[in-house]
Image: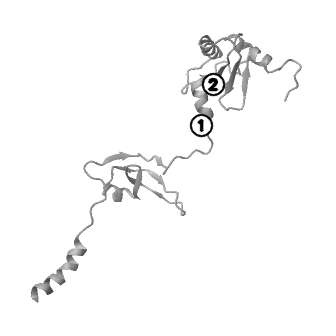
Amino acid sequence: VRVTLFAALCFPIYACSSSSPPIQVDTVYLNGTVVTVNEAGTTAEAVATRGDEIIAVGNNSEIEALAGRSTRVVNLEGKTMLPGFYAPHDHFPGAGTLATRSVNLNSPPMGEMRTIADVVAALRQKATETMSGEWVNGRGYDDTLLEEGRHPTRYDLDQASTEHPIYISHTSGHLAVANSLALEMAGVTRDTPQP
């Protein structure tokens, strides 16, 4: 009876003191501003993940305590971390098409165009790689970053090729320039009314 009573009294103490197995995490991200997107709009300092799952969110000490010997530790250095991909205004299919089929006309640091002559040279190179009569497209020129401080004209683009219709878009996506052949193909003449 005494052994049974002793065991009965000790079991609750043992049960309370035994801890559940530690949480296994692959990576902890510390020292950041973690946007939780919860209803309260709170932020945290750190996140623990396993595979592609978020396991825990909290302050640095809580999350650091979950790290084991093989856990990768990433110092966010105050950067913001979002729980997913947020893109308020993107055009992915168009961006992919432009990136694979167009000449990059961005100025540094996104590209190499410093002058209108650079733009013309890049378009001329693309024209030499393109069958005669096929379109040559460019994207991303920025008149404010070109040495001349102006937009290229159709006459500038004619220097790249008169055998290819050429169309280039501004970095904003809201302006474009075409060479004489492209304008002719579109039926645009001196007498065409301004839109």
The residue sitting at the left extreme is: 2
Measuring from the top left, give residue 86's x and y in whole percent: 55, 47
When the figure is inspected, residue 84 is found, relative to residue 123, above or below; the finding is below
Q: Is residue 152 visible?
A: yes
Image position of 18 with respect to 84: above or below: below
For discs 2 and 1, the disc positioned in front in the rendered view: 1
Q: Which mark is residue 145?
A: 2
Query: Callout 1, which amino acid?
Result: Phe
Q: Which mark is residue 92?
A: 1
- Which quadrant of the structure image shows residue 100? top right
Q: List x then y, in percent, for residue 138.
A: 64, 22
In the drawing, does residue 192 fall left or right of residue 43?
Answer: right
Give the total of numbered labels.
2
Q: Residue at x 76, y 14 (%)?
A: 181
Earlier-in-chain disc, 2 versus 1: 1
Q: CA distance from mark 2 to mark 1?
A: 25 Å
Q: Which part of the image, by quadrant, shows the C terminus? A: top right
Where disc 1 sits, the SS reads helix
Taking the image as shown, residue 47 lies to the left or right of residue 24, namely right
Packing grade of label 2 (10 A; few <14, some 14-19, many >=20) is some
Cβ atoms at labels 2 and 1 below 8 Å apart: no
Q: Residue at x 27, y 66 (%)?
A: 20
Q: Amino acid at mark 2?
A: Leu
Identify the residue shown where x is 88% and y is 25%. 193
Relative to 174, residue 153 above or below: above
Figure quadrant of residue 133: top right
Counting from the top left corner in percent of width and height, residue 77 is at 41, 45
Numbered circle sitting on residue 182? none
Q: Nearest the camera: 117 or 83?
A: 83
Disc 2 element: loop
Q: Is residue 130 above or below residue 54?
A: above
